[in-house]
Amino acid sequence: MPLELREADAERDFPALFRALFESYDNPPQSLVNVYFAPRGENEPAQEARLKEAADRFADWHANDPTSYWQKVVDTDSGKIVGGACWNVHSGNPFAQAHNLEITWLPDDGSREFASEFLRQYSVPRALVGQKPQVYLYIIFTIPAYRRKGVAQKFMSWGMDKADELGVEMFLDASPVGMPLYEANKFICLKENIIVPEANTPTPSGGWKRMESEVGTVRLYLMWRPINGNYIEGETKLPAEVE
């Protein structure tokens, strides 16, 4: 079962990548996926439509974002994609321009408003400290059968090598599940981000309430790696806003 890290083929790989992503984020369940993807289907055709929408949308985002770099890890015995990662390699300030993301994948019943506020809160901590060139880990996953076999570390090693090559810092937003991987790679936790969207009306819509129930309170941790990974506790200067 030799495992090989490869660049993802945008024209061919996204359906298989997102099938693996859904499998990964369902075990254990990651509630924040309810923000990024259409509601779960009640039957197989609906689930396949959900998968196709996600794969097509992310492929389009990738094609129109020069900072986007998708990777896959392949079991070379079977050809199966067993993990994936998406990096954003920024040569400048990623927050220099406003990003007005149109949320089309959720019903227009209050769900989109919930997701918009969720994504706003998601971006706040990094926007405070990360207005500089950087390598950012946006997505990473490994299907359950291939965990603890070094798949995620292949992605992390590539990202750290790329950051060192460019002489830039690294950032990522970690879930509690992912924290051990990043801590093992000597990333520093800068800030806990507790995301709890609040409706701007005393009577939230049905869609808002549904999202509120499905997503719940999400805890993420803004993680940072200094240039070349040279962190010395008590000596290395942290990003100013979190000191």
Image (tube, rainbow, N blue to C red):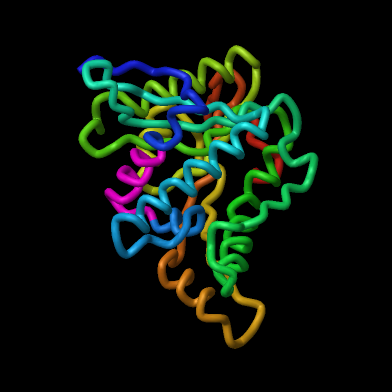
Residue at 54% x, 36% y is 59
Spot the residue most to the right: 97
Residue at 23% x, 21% y is 78
User: Is residue 20 one of those drawn in magenta?
Assistant: yes
Q: Is residue 45 above or below residue 242?
A: below
Q: Position of residue 197 (x, y in %)?
A: 57, 68
Instruction: Name the image quarter holding residue 184.
Output: top left
Left or right, 24 with reference to 15: left
Left or right, 102 with reference to 114: right
- Image quadrant where one finds the N terminus: top left
User: Is residue 124 one of those drawn in magenta?
Assistant: no
In front of the other: 52 or 81: 52
Left or right, 2 with reference to 118: left
Q: Is residue 60 above or below residue 159?
A: below
In front of the other: 79 or 216: 79
Q: Position of residue 7 (x, y in %)?
A: 47, 20
Spot the residue most to the top: 165
In front of the other: 87 or 42: 42
Secondary structure character of the magenta stretch overall: helix
- Image quadrant where one finds the C terminus: top right
Residue at 40% x, 35% y is 17
Instruction: Name the image quarter holding residue 111.
Output: bottom right
Q: Position of residue 193 (x, y in %)?
A: 54, 54
Q: Is residue 117 above or below residue 80?
A: below
Query: For the magenta stretch, what is the residue range?
Result: 18-30
Residue at 70% x, 40% y is 240
Spot the residue most to the front: 45
Q: How many marks?
A: 0
Left or right, 76 with reference to 58: left
